Image: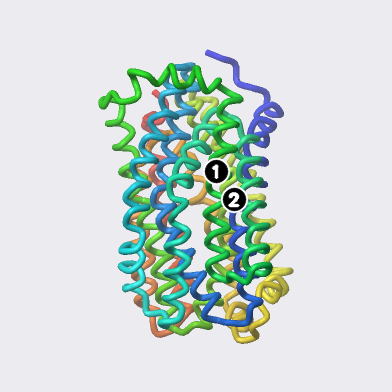
Amino acid sequence: MRPLPPAWAAQRQLLALALPMLLSNITVPLLGLVDTWVIGHLGETALLGGVAVGATLVNLLYWVLGFLRMSTTGLTAQALGGNDQEALTLLLGRGLLLAVLLSLPVLLLRHPLGELALSWSDASREVQEYAFSYLTIRLWGAPAALCNLVILGWLLGRHDARSPMWLLIASNLLNIVLDLALVWGLGWRVEGVALASMLADYAALALGIVLIGRHIPLAELWRSWRGKLFALAPYRRLLALNRDIFIRALCLQLCFAFMTFQGARLGDVVVAANAVLLNFLMLISYGLDGFAYAAEALVGRAVGARHRPQLAQAIRLSVGWSFGVALLTSLLFALAGSSLVAAMTSMTDVIAEAQRNLPWLIAMPLLAVWCYLLDGIFIGATRAREMRDSMLLAVLCGYFPVWWLLRDSGNLALWAALAALMVGRALGLGWWLHRLWHSRALVD
């Protein structure tokens, strides 16, 4: 059995994985903030609401299919811990094949999917028209976007956090530049925002292929896939794992979609204000996910190596750093939240509504950090069934009951329900971790 790394070496290993992912993750919601800023200063509430609704639907789809990244990370990290080189290459090929197959119906059915999704919305007709335009353009990038999820998961599972960092930073900076050029330069408004994101997805895929080649020559990778990639038996575990993560992600994104659509029923001002706050919430979640991603890689490698002390150390260090980042984030929004909201839009009614609900945003890092981190631990251990069950309980026993009880309070009910969802997920996953650890089910 390998000796446990000294404390300083373990801290350095965690930070080497977490900090690049934290920095790159921040660029993802930063893109959403730039979209909001670019559209928010055009002076039309319906434009901002349309981008918010359209982006919510696209994010719902991609997050629901986020199992492509999560399962790839956990399985790749375990293969790395077990020193199984053949599995490392085949996991990438299987993930990419699955991503392409899933993207085809999305691409072909984007118009009916858009019409069906927007039929559930009570937003104004103008907001729905803008949202449909955004959605149908953006989904042209589905093949690239889904393949990028697999590439990110594979690189992170190999404990290479710098390549995903450069991949995300480069693609999102390109997206921002295209945003400004197409919306403010060419005046394409909603269409420009959607086209910028779609083009950035394909640019990211090209860069991702280059980054894969730094680990394994592409010709060698192709040779290793021949004759093995289409064997059906190995897909059974992958599909079972993806099924449970899919259900978990679907529940989470349905809660966010419900919040957007219910906000739309309260008026264009509420949906626009919530779009501003939810973009900040995404910034928070992606920042905290930096340490969750590090936990995925470290836990997965420890599980693959069947090294219980290393697993305990990975969990302990991840908890400490995650709490520290969450506390600093809450302080940041407590001190500068009002100014940040005012910087996002020039519409005074939207600013006023967003600032009324700012206390929820201040509290959210400390409420949500635990479920983000525990998700990372369970993904690394490829224990998706427990993630699924915890999410279902949090939705059915927390999110919707809280909203129902407070539904006459307007927007407050939506934010209280979201807080209940985060706390419920953390309690459920914490209970499962305690049970699995003491039964020695994570590592025999």
Which residue, given by chain and number where applicable, does mark 1 sit on? 292
At a point 42% along the width and 76% down the height, the residue shown is: 128
Q: Are marks 1 and 2 in contact (CB under 8 Å)?
A: yes
Tell me if mark 2 has few (under 14), some (14-19) or many (20+) residues whose alpha carbon lies within 10 angstroms of its own: many
Residue found at x 55% / y 56% = 197
Q: In this view of the protein, which residue sits in the foreground, 59 or 334?
A: 59
Identify the residue at horizontal 51%, vertical 26% (top origin).
301
Which residue corresponds to mark 2? Answer: 288
Quadrant location of the C terminus in the rendered image? top left
Mark 2 falls on what kind of element? helix
Q: Is residue 111 left or right of residue 359?
A: left
State whether residue 123 is above or below residue 204. Answer: below
Q: Position of residue 121 (x, y in %)?
A: 36, 75
373 lies above or below 209: below
Q: Quadrant of residue 162?
A: top right
In this rendering, the answer to whether 336 lies above or below 423 is below
- Label 1's element? helix
CA separation, marks 1 and 2?
7 Å
Residue 354 at x, y percent in the picture? 59, 77
Residue 263 at x, y percent in the picture: 45, 77
Q: Residue furthest top?
A: 1
Q: Amino acid at mark 2?
A: Leu
Q: Is residue 366 visible?
A: no
- Amino acid bearing label 1: Ala
Count of numbered circles in the view: 2
Identity of the residue drawn at 55% across and 75% down: 48
The single residue placed furthest to the front in the displayed view is 186
Give residue 259's position: percent from left, percent from top. Answer: 43, 71
Q: Is residue 204 visible?
A: yes
Q: Is residue 52 toward the left or the right of residue 350 in the image?
A: left
